[in-house]
Image: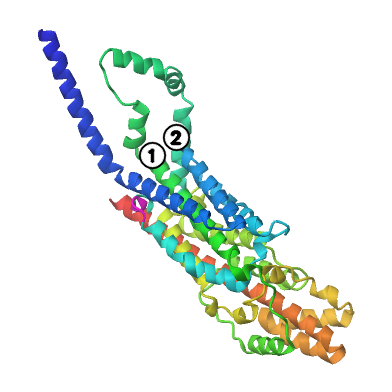
Amino acid sequence: MEGWFYLKLFWAFLTLITLILVIFVLIKSRGVFLWRRALHADLLELRQRAGNAGNPTKLAIQLVENRCREVLSAFSPEIGELRNLPRFIHNIAACYHPTSEQPALMVTTGSFLQSIDKTLGRFDDILNRPGFKRLRSVNIRNIKNSHRWYRRITTSFFFSWYFRYKKAIRRILRSRLILLPDPFIWLAYLSNRLTLLLLIKYLMIDLYLFFGRLAIETFGHREAVGGDRPERKEDLEATLQELKSYEEIDEFPIDPEIKKIREGLLGFVAVVTSTPSLTEWKNAVHEASRIISKKYFPEAVNPLEEAALGPLLERSRHWIGTLGKGDQYLLTRYFYKMRLETLYRAKNLSDLVLSKPFKIFLEKAFKTYGGLKWPFTVYRWAKKRSPWIIAMEVGWLAVKKSGMAYIYGKTFDQACKELEIVYRQSCDLRNDAQKK
């Protein structure tokens, strides 16, 4: 009988310990549970929206939902997968424009800006998610290290052995009246690294939801499939006058190395004889971020990975917000009903007028007057020496190229400003953590 008494005492003690651990886990992981519940609610709302939508929107919503649930089912998705976001947005755009080679460019400038303005509040929801505070000071290097740590555990001999005989082990424990939770469940919730990976997973889902909703809002907009704005002579001359009177103001000092990268992106060859691509813009921003990060983390092996998630997302939100403020961008009112494709596919200007004197004049005008003012001079020169239809075509083509250069330049400069803040704040967070 004494043995039975001690056994019941052992059970009572074990139950108490388990209860304390459960309470501890619930308190520690409250943000994880609440974030997961919020995501399930958002996915349910997205599915309900598909019920009253047209075919293209249904397909787009299904694509977003499938991607989010795919990430949700993966225990430890790599944050590097977010580099596939452009392909994700391209696939959503293809639901609305299945026959287009570049469906993401079929949207009008106005529709794009309005959609950013409408959906930006959802980015704020991400920053206010329960559990996001725990991610604020975590940098990309920490995330990669946690992921590698998780990989080592899951490929270890004990892990493989346990999961091979998990059912048999549980039956033996139950037959001995020992009720213990799965040790790897406890590991997941008690380990800071695994909790971090769970929070990163939910953050990734939130980002896919944000960009998915933004894409659906943009490409589902009624103006997204509309025609381009007619190119009138009055609009052209008003645009050229605005460009001529515009004064370029440097908002912040540019590092000489970054200035060289900017010139490579927006120089004469890049703008006039070709059209800078989004890939070239991304490569330029990447090179600039490498220079900026090295300034704040000179001792780091890979300084780019020292960016903390809090500043990174907060400044990304601010950068996206500046894109939505179309009134702050020159030429927006002239391009408002024009498709991005029309701007992006501006052909080689030197191919339009083949005379050698014109090419020489074009280069001189660009180098003398800069990236915005040269179209006015080129238009006047073409107007004197060609029919007005050709002059108008030359003028609009120059305006579009100058407009693309302006947009690329503005967004590049803003990205560099935000990256400067991101790495400075990340450095401050690291220093604060070291002091503690």
Residue 311 screen position, x and y as percent: 42, 59
- Residue ranking furthest to the right: 355
Label 2, secondary structure: give it. Answer: helix
Look at label 2 and name its amino acid: Trp
381 with respect to 109 (left or right): right
Q: What residue does disc 2 label?
A: 149
370 with respect to 312 (left or right): right
Residue 305 screen position, x and y as percent: 49, 50
Q: Does the stretch in magenta take in 415?
A: no
Pointer 2 with pointer 1, Cβ within 8 A: yes
Residue 37 screen position, x and y as percent: 37, 47
Disc 2 crowd rating (10 Å Cα; few below 14, some 14-19, many 20+) is few
- Residue ranking furthest to the bottom: 384
Q: From this viewpoint, is residue 384 visible?
A: yes
- Residue ranking furthest to the front: 52
Q: Which residues are magenta?
A: 129-133
Q: Nearer the viewer, residue 329 or 180?
A: 180
Q: Nearer the viewer, residue 158 or 92?
A: 92
Disc 1 crowd rating (10 Å Cα; few below 14, some 14-19, many 20+) is some
